[in-house]
Amino acid sequence: MMTQNIRTLFLIISIIFYLLIGAAVFDALESDSESSRSRALEQKLNELKRKYGLKEDEYREIERVVLQSEPHHAGRQWKFAGSFYFAITVITTIGYGHAVPRTNAGRAFCMVYAVLGIPLTLVMFQSLGERINMLVRYLLCRAKQGLGFQRTEVSMGNMVLVGFLSCSSTLCIGAAAFAHFENWTFFNACYYCFITLTTIGFGDFVALQKKDILQNQPPYVALSFMYILVGLTVVGAFLNLVVLRFLTVNADVRAASEGEDSIKVLCFLHQMPKTSSNLTPSSFIVFHSIVQSEAVGV
Amino acid sequence: MKRQNARTLALIICTFTYLIVGAAIFDALESQKETSQRGELDQRKEQLLRTYNLSSEVYEQLEKVVLALKQHKAGVQWKFAGSFYFAITVITTIGYGHAAPSTNAGKAFCMLYALLGIPLTLVMFQSVGERINTFVRYLLHRLKKCLGMRRTEVSMVNMVTIGFVSCMSTLCVGALAFSHFEGWSFFHAYYYCFITLTTIGFGDYVALQNEQALQTKPQYVAFSFIYILTGLAVIGAFLNLAVLRFMTMNAEDEKRDAEQRALLAHNGQAGGHINCSVDPISSSSTPSGCGGLSSVSGNGGGTASRGLRNVYAEVLHFQSMCSCLWYKSREKLQYSIPMIIPRDFSTSDTYMEHGESFSNRLHSNSCVCNLQVHSGISSVSTGLHSISTYRRLNKRRSSI
């Protein structure tokens, strides 16, 4: 019991520290730029207001219209292509916000849609990711055999390396494509792909938002959708390889401790010797896994 | 086709169908409103241009400035409180976008920050969620005892019901709070909480953006942060309970297939080489090593109660890892099963991890099984589990 509590507490404290450190760094990086931009924009606004003789309430009117028109700039967002895009952002939890349901019925349906869709998508990506990892493991084993390696087992290190490389190349390919089609810089396109494939989805950069692309260029639209889904699969496979085991660690430790209690009963019932002088190799396995499970959490 | 492949294919088809159906429904719900709103706004714009005597270029200029100012209207976004809010939206992957880094350094740091922070957060929420589930299970068990119920085990259905109810109440509590503080309707506040706690995070509704709240209302700010993190923990607990097992299904099947393959491959050998008793009832000697496993690393010992663990290890080893022995001795074990599993294991959530098969390098004189080394403790739990739940698991597999 204690191990899991300690581990959980440790994780909570780490997150809080991580957030504090992140906040401090973002503050340092962005605050000055923010205030100078804000000042510059206010100045420009006042200039424009003076130049065209706009009073405050007149400006407010214009402001309102402008803000409300914003989502319409990118063309029709709710025809089938746009709705499909939106549905993707919902069930993958990317959630750009470039298009949001405006009717209450749309919002209610969105919630219901997400409740079913998100677990389905999670399970699907993990399932597919596990299959991909199996395939990669097999291919790597054959490659090692083909290259005449002595030891053809595929280690975890190999798998993690391959996973990391595929994630990076997915990111780069996407960045190159979107930089070309959307006219972004390569860095911004990288940033866009990263924010999308980690499902953060700020919405500061969104693909398929140039004028009417959703309606007029179906191949590019289809390609973008495929890229997002395939990219999420690749990232999901990497997560399946590296992170999923840590999500189940607490449960395993608890089951083990339950197992230990059972063994005590077992011993009592069958009066097996409580100590054994020779440590057989099999016990090393158990030790190893117990020791490892402690190590995993720390 | 292999079960795992069939399952994966089915899931892919399901997801695509789900997307298509969803797209069609959203189209039906939103398209009309979009068209009419667009028409209205165009009319308003024409009106404004005429009323204030503005040309299109001027309007465009104004537009650019207004849109650029949008972020700043909500207050200072990057002072410490705002940055903390932003950091939360990054590592929880909510990602409202109400504030996004504009400097290249900010973007680069954001990516690095997310790379480390997201897995850490995932593990943390699942860890906390598992603790919460265990605690709830314990409370429910005590409650059942107190109420004098005959069967005091906590079933999965109990847990799922409680999980669902706590999620709903978390959403409602949040909706009440935010509708009060932000001036939204209850429905919109509920929608906001839902979109936030599922980490979708559109950004159409974002808390702490009115009246410079980030700078002027520290208690409300603290409440919002705590609400978001706690809410995510509650949702995480529910996911840990209901969804996590499905994410490891393929891996479990792979493991089972590997065990079956090992059994088939070494069926002949199993008969001749067993020289150790597997019967836990016999009190004679601790079964001597059915070799079979390489000591994975010299990690022997260091932990307490080695003797107990030895016994544990022997029993486990024979019963789980050496599947050939498992099959050979199944008949013997059957009558001892109630003894070995004194407690009801139906409530424990043990998930088998995927292990890596490795070829047996030891010069074993008995079972040469295609053994799997599990990187976690699952092997330990698997052992006891496998006895009583092996067949149950098998049945469960075939039903999904």
Image: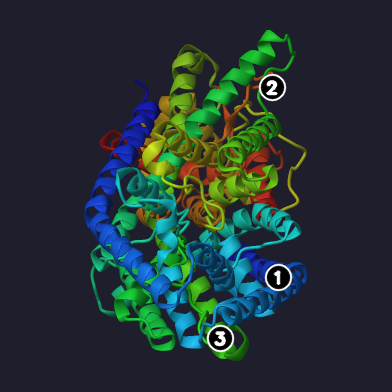
Callout 2 amino acid? Leu
- Distance, label 1 to label 2, CA atoms, is 46 Å
Q: Is residue B155 left or right of residue A22?
A: left
Instruction: Please give the residue where the numbered disc 3 appears in the rendered image.
Output: B213
Question: For the residues tagged 1 and 3, is the chain the same?
Answer: no
Instruction: Please give the residue where the numbered disc 1 appears in the rendered image.
Output: A17
Callout 1 amino acid? Phe
The C terminus of chain B: image quadrant: top left
Give the residue displayed 36% in from the left and 47% down from the top.
A82
Q: Nearer the viewer, mark 2 or mark 3?
A: 3
Between disc 2 and disc 3, whose residue precedes? 3
* x and y, in percent, of residue A199 in the image: 52, 52
Q: Chain of mark 1?
A: A
- Label 2 crowd (10 A; few <14 / some 14-19 / many >=20): few
Q: Chain of mark 3?
A: B
When asked about the image quadrant of residue A99, the answer is bottom left
* x and y, in percent, of residue B9 in the image: 36, 30
Q: Is residue B322 left or right of residue B305?
A: left
- Label 3 crowd (10 A; few <14 / some 14-19 / many >=20): many
When asked about the image quadrant of residue A111, the answer is bottom left
Callout 3 amino acid? Ala
Give the residue displayed 67% in from the left and 47% down from the top.
A292
- Label 1 crowd (10 A; few <14 / some 14-19 / many >=20): few
Q: Is residue A189 left or right of residue B389?
A: right
Q: Secondary structure at mark 1?
A: helix
Instruction: Please give the residue where the numbered disc 2 appears in the rendered image.
Output: B362
- Distance, label 2 to label 3, CA atoms, is 66 Å
